[in-house]
Image (cartoon, rainbow, N blue to C red):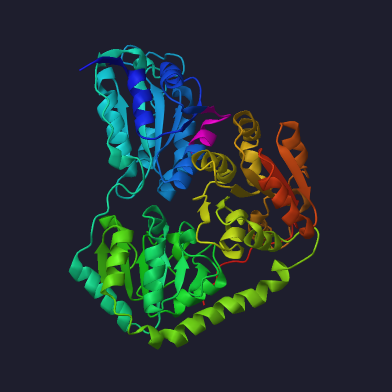
Amino acid sequence: MPKMTGAQVMAEMLKGYGVTHTFLVPAVLRRSMAEMEERTNIARIQTHGEKSAAYMADGYARAGKKPGVCMAQVIGALNLAAGLRDAYLAKAPVLAFTGGRVPETKFRKVYQEVDDVPAFEPVTKFNATVDDASRFPDMLRQAFRTAMSGCPGPVHLQFAGNEGQLDIEEAEMEVIIEEDFKELPPYRPEPEPARVKKAVELLEKAERPVIVSGGGVRSSCASRELIALAEKLNIPVATSLNGKDNIPGNHPLSVGVVGTYSRKSANRVVNAADLVFFVGTETGGMTTHFWAVPPIGTPAIQLDIEPEALARNYPLQVAVLGDARVSLQKMVDAASGDSAASRAGWVERAQAFVQGWRDEFTGYLESDAAPMRPERICQELTDSLPSDCVVLADTGHSGMWMGGMYDLSHPDQSYMRSAGHLGWAFSAGLGAKCAVPDRPVLTFNGDSGFWYHLSEIETAVRWKINAVTLVNNNASGNQSKRGFDRAYGGQQTEQAYELWVLNEVNFAEIAESMGALGIRVEKPGELRSALDQAFSANRPVVIDCVSDIEAMAPLAVTE
């Protein structure tokens, strides 16, 4: 077995697992950085903050369905852990590497000493220290294996030394790459045939079944099988936010996103159903609007790759444990489809809910008002984005607007959303563009979220990361308006507005000053040409859309 340094092993293994970019705040694993330069073509993207590095790795992992890597020295480790929270909630395979304490100086108040390993415990599937150079190969393999297996998620390895200087040490080591863990999913466990048969029988017998499709379908690359089952049995499909791109919004069985950040039609269809088939979703509070859509007790079936997810929130008539793609295909094969015609009236009713939603919001979706209505911005994106575009949305009002008002129009379009952290989308969009450089990438942000990591415009320019960033700029964090209305008894004071209203800023000018292309859009009719210009610019672009501060995203319905 040859003698190698930890840095050499690190460079060779990242290369072997197909990593093309790492996202980091220096200085960490310095010798590994040098070995990457000498041995690989891996881009080492220096960001302006550890959370941003984690978000970029998250976007990279979700867009590319492959491992994303972020790094920080010991003093930035806690910030990196905070950034992993979104990847953990959204089930993204992110590997986080940090520097750490060494035995010689523990408990002596060495500069920057904090035991940060516990901070990673709640946001990772695997959290470990590497204190001996000989452990580089097996611990890295374990990190990739854990991040990618089953329900994906982040892992953390802390390397000894405040900058991970353990990587300069030598040991007898062999670089072994486990090819299964380069792309999602590595394994496709098959379900029990009896459970598949029972699930299909229940769906065939149901008069008003609905499918609720989640992020597990996306991770499994199972959207075709999902749609095939829905079409064979003539069953409407609602999605979680994480599963929004599992079925195009213009498909005749699509009813929209269900839950809290939702479309009214989806909630109404799910609550009118006599059987709900949850596929690849944890049935969490956002997807079910805190277990009111559908109410607990509604007859349900659930398919998931993680056994502990099954029946967590809803008692089940049958639980199916397995990979979504394999399991759905087996259900397609097992279904006769003879019952499909009997559900024509149910599908017609579901589509009437969809049309009712559209009729209610057509005035906003087609509004020519200035400042712009966010609904009109979303409609322009529905109509104008490239057929293979990757779309990312921030949380808060951005997530509500895009979850409810934006439709994917093509099966090759992709959609990802923040799992709850304002400011995620811009940085994640840069990471997504690194993962799929040949596809157009657009992020939808509010100005309040965009402020979080505004400095990464410079990163995008420096590394020529040509993503398009659209800012819904209403000079506020106006999702908070309703809450402050309640807090102040219905009428806010002038001082109350200080808590959510911001200065008016031209983000296009800021982008230009950093070397990106900035485009200011003040009227709805200008947006389509701005999008055309942005996607043909071959440089980072910020589109600043001036929108109405009074526009409030619709709240979820439960009736």
Please tell me whether residue 393 is drawn above or below residue 145 in the rendered image.
Answer: below
In percent of the image, x 46 and y 18: which residue is there? Answer: 112
**Residue 227 quadrant:** bottom left
Q: Is residue 407 left or right of residue 298?
A: right
The x, y position of residue 414, in whole percent, is: 51, 54
Q: Which residues are magenta?
A: 45-54
Please tell me whether residue 444 is drawn above or below residue 58 in the rendered image.
Answer: below
In percent of the image, x 52 and y 35: which residue is there? Answer: 51
Question: Is residue 134 highlighted in magenta?
Answer: no
Name the one closer to the observer, 233 or 277: 233
The x, y position of residue 319, in whole percent, is: 26, 66
Question: So how many labels did they put on this image?
Answer: 0
Name the one closer to the observer, 552 or 181: 181
The x, y position of residue 50, in whole percent, is: 51, 31
Question: Is residue 52 highlighted in magenta?
Answer: yes
In percent of the image, x 29 and y 15: which residue is there? Answer: 4
